[in-house]
Image (tube, rainbow, N blue to C red):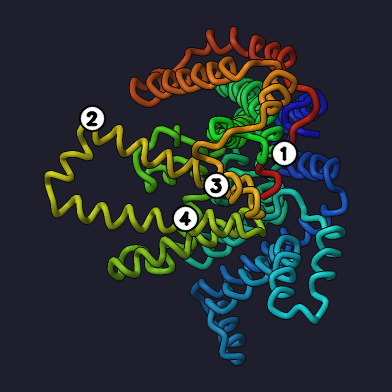
Amino acid sequence: MTLVSFAYGCFLLVTLIVYWGLGKLWPALRQWILLGASLAFYGLLQPQFVPLLLGLTVLNFFWGRLLGRLGQRGDRQRHLREVFRVWHWEPRYWLGLGIFLNLAVLFGFKYVAFTLRNLAVLWPGLGLGQWAIATEENWLAPIGISFFVFECIAYLVDVYRGAPATSALVEFSAYKLFFPKLLSGPITRFHAFTGQTRRTAGLLFDEGVEGLWLIASGAVKKVLIADNLGVFVELCANNLERAGSGDLWLFILAYGLQLYFDFSGYVDLARGSALLLGINLPENFDFPYFSTSLADFWRRWHMSLGDWLRNYLYFPLGGSRRGLGRTCLNLFVVMLLAGLWHGAAWGYVIWGCLHGLGLAIHRLGDICAQRWRSLQGFWVSIPGTLVAWLVTQGFVFLTWVPFRLPTGTQASLLFQHLWQHQGDLQFAQKIYLEGLRLGRPDFVGLLIVLFIGMIGAYGVQRQWQLQLNWAVKVLLIPLCFYGVWLLAPEGNVPYIYFDF
């Protein structure tokens, strides 16, 4: 059951009726209803992993209570701290152990095969390669496990830093297993989420319209744009050796757009579903492809992950408080780990390293611009802004290549053929005319129209701060759903970020 399907629509409708119907009579039932709906939702996808997620939820709930008691003052808490000091363990050690247990689960499901495969290269006589192959073939990772673990770590760290630990297991479980965000985020903090589940008022009209609009626009992004771009990307990725240089540039551009609209569409669907339940999830994208620096890109791309990386990794490492060299090193380490978080392949590691180096170079460039006013003046001028945008987005789109082709062989082939390489004469026939039912010029024209539409949306929403009123949204919602039903490509294209 995907978020763009008739089955999900029926599931969401039943959940809304029960949630607002019974919840109005007995508000205390709302969190139980959310929990039951979330378990049913995940159970329809991967029922074998429901006990695992419940076990991790219970573990982190009680671990948070332990950290909360160790951090409180009072005779009872003082006695508890004295008991633990017998083992010479401070609260930070219990925090570290809690983080380790969560990361161990994540490592066990995502990185065992990758580790064995690389160890087999160092020690080929141990037979680790066969173990790696067997693990890859038989070991399935739960959907959303990376997001799930990151939220657990954030909760433990927040409690350790002084935030109150919840004493209600159902409240914490409803937050951790909340079905709109369970599979691919956005990453949400417990204390910002849980207060919204305690509201006694019903669903407001504006919330209902905005929720449906987010679902409709998310479906358009996912199905009409991302999935149709994905047809070209998949065909091209399977025939890279036959593609010409122009086709490869179109592949890079199309994949970058597919990735954005696929994930942005999912987040819109998740936020819309949550808003219909009276819960406002954080935004995850703010027109990242219009950013003019890599640092700005990471403030506007996958914003909840960027916020997590800053608060729970970059700042604890020292941030920018320990000199320029340490700052650059911290940026590199953070992005390296961000690459590993996305997947167990060297392509993701390379992608993270490239972005770490890019952020470090940007930090050095900022310092140079502060010392030379002429350089600073150039970057704020119109030509400088255009150059900065071209450099930033060129870097971002090119670094998506190891992200899409993480094994390395295909990525190397693509970069070798980027300039003055003649493609197979039958490539255009197979990919464009048979696969897309479009000529190459028509496909390029559609990409241009898409980019113009993005410019228009950016100007209206970000520059002029204009929003559609509720009447226009009500009119457009059924048109969006009709367009999705009419123009959806054949087959069910899974969300890209479900792999992460």
Front in this rendered view, residue 156 or 139: 139
Circle 3 — which element? helix
Residue type at mark 4 is: Leu
> Of callouts 3 and 1, which one flags the residue occurring earlier in the amino acid sequence?
1
Q: Is residue 464 left or right of residue 73?
A: left
Q: Position of residue 432 (x, y in %)?
A: 67, 22
**Is residue 279 in view?**
no
- Mark 4 to mark 3 CA distance (whole Å): 18 Å
The quadrant in which the N terminus is found is: top right
Residue type at mark 1 is: Asn
User: Residue 314 sits in which quadrant?
Assistant: bottom left
Q: Position of residue 284 (x, y in %)?
A: 52, 39
Front in this rendered view, residue 133 or 429: 429
Q: CB of mark 4 within 8 Å of CB of mark 3?
A: no
**Disc 2 designates what residue?**
382
| Residue positioned 48% across, 61% down in the render | 334
| Residue positioned 78% across, 61% down in the render | 55
**Disc 4 designates what residue?**
354
- Mark 4 to mark 2 CA distance (whole Å): 27 Å
Front in this rendered view, residue 65 or 182: 182
Circle 1 — which element? loop
> Of callouts 2 and 3, which one flags the residue occurring earlier in the amino acid sequence?
2
Residue type at mark 2 is: Ile
Q: Position of residue 312 (x, y in %)?
A: 49, 61
**Disc 3 designates what residue?**
416
Badge 1: how crowded within 10 Å, few (<14), some, or many (20+)? Answer: few
**Disc 1 designates what residue?**
238
User: Residue 262 sits in which quadrant?
Assistant: top right
Q: Is residue 238 left or right of residue 213?
A: right
